Amino acid sequence: MLRNRRIVLVEDDSIMGGSLVQRLELEGARVLWLKQMVRALGAIRTPNAPIDAVVCDIALPDGSGEELFATLARTSTPPPFLFITGQGGISQAVRLMKAGAADYVTKPFDMSVFLERLGLLVGNRKSPSPTDDFPPLLGVSSAARQIEALIDKAAANDQPVLIRGGPGTGKDLVARRIHDLSDRRVTPFVTVDLVREADADAALFGSASGFGTVRDGTLFLQAVGRMGAEVQSRLLDRLDQGGEARLIAACGTDLEALIQDGRFSAELFLRLAQNEIPIPPLGTRPQDAIWLLHQLFRKLGPRQAPQVEGISTLCEEAVRTHDWPGGGRELRTRLLRGLAMATGSLLQPSDLFPEHQAGPGEFLSLAQAREAAERVQIITALDRTGGQIGEAARLLRISRTTLWEKMQRLGLSGL
């Protein structure tokens, strides 16, 4: 019942904790043991992989299990909690059950009873899927888990896949995950980005690219909406003929409009969308924005700003309420700039959003407002062009050199 289940144990007693970890691992569970509420809060809120259950002592050295559960519940739905309490804490445990906790056991308890209660708790959750051996791809929200389920389904067959999403939503990551989970994982994964290709026909059908090199692997076609009518027709013919390669295509959110305008083949759309994976904007998934912030901070913080020890709760709230028009790419860019500008030990909202520094009743200067507007436009243009500076400069109607200089001045050169 517990095999391959991910369990977080929050217990400060070394003897009790060690005993539980040993037994849970013998049952096949993967256990993360934490001894403080503050560490458990971060680990549960932004996990490296989905958590099946939390086993938590009510009495902790820096707070209580009740505080931990209540804090998590304010912003998301916590994993199932099994609380451990002494006889005197039964009324508190009952109160937690009414608040949404799954179950509790009282000390001292028989290990078989504990395992039975925990087994019943995780047994009500879905069985592990192939992606459970991989870390979360786009986040830990219910929307992100639904995407993981669609990835599982797509990886189990060889039909074409259409990934749809706006700028910076991770369409390329989804394509790669499908390939890595499929039977083709040891074959080539070839990417053709039509934003970067002047000749789409040659990029797809030339002997040295696209179908000419992928063999029995996966061909990932980015920005499929940019194909001209002749290339669309040729791709449709290729799909009709069959072949060894598997096709994964990606597009923005405007494909229906292109079909209505006659600029994209409805028949090709139906062929590509046999496995369709829509990715909601990051701005509609605040829990995933917080998760991504912490993932990037762990990766970039020690190298870019070792003096910054963590992220303030005010900064998390600012990230939660931002609409993220540039998706994950914008978040990464703002974090890099924030790490470079931070002066304290914790990252603050003003580090990530310097354009919001004006206080109540105050105005940004025209120079500050212009800089904030330019930053958003540049991020959007780079997202739309897949990071191609020349193409982004064309959209912004400035020279490549001017764009590069602005990126340097605005702290966007790491984008």
Image (tube, rainbow, N blue to C red):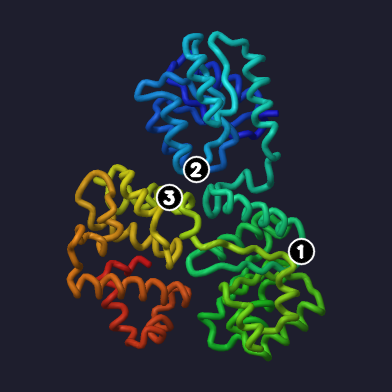
In this rendering, the count of numbered labels is 3
Quarter the N terminus occupies: top right
Cα distance between the residues tagged 2 and 1? 36 Å
Q: CB of mark 2 within 8 Å of CB of mark 1?
A: no
Q: Earlier in the sequence, mark 2 or mark 1?
A: 2
Q: Earlier in the sequence, mark 3 or mark 1?
A: 1
Nearest the camera: 8 or 178?
Answer: 8
**Mark 2 highlights which residue?**
76
Query: In the figure, residue 275 lies in which quadrant?
Result: bottom right
* Residue at the limit of the structure toward the bottom, as seen here: 230
Q: Position of residue 347 (x, y in %)?
A: 28, 49
Residue 87 against residue 55 in the figure, above or below: above
Q: Can residue 200 be seen in this view?
A: yes
Mark seen at residue 270: none
Cα distance between the residues tagged 3 and 1? 34 Å
Kindly identify the amino acid type of the residue bearing the numbered disc 2: Ser
Mark 3 vs mark 2, foreground winner is 2
Mark seen at residue 290: 3
Nearest the camera: 41 or 134?
Answer: 41
The residue that appears at 51% across and 80% down in the rendered structure is 196
Q: In this view, does 400 lie to the left or right of 295?
A: left
Q: CB of mark 3 within 8 Å of CB of mark 2?
A: no
Cα distance between the residues tagged 3 and 2? 11 Å
Of helix, strand and loop, which one carries label 3?
Answer: helix
Q: Where is residue 240 in the image (x, y as percent from the top left)?
A: 81, 79
**Mark 1 highlights which residue?**
158
Mark 3 vs mark 1, foreground winner is 3
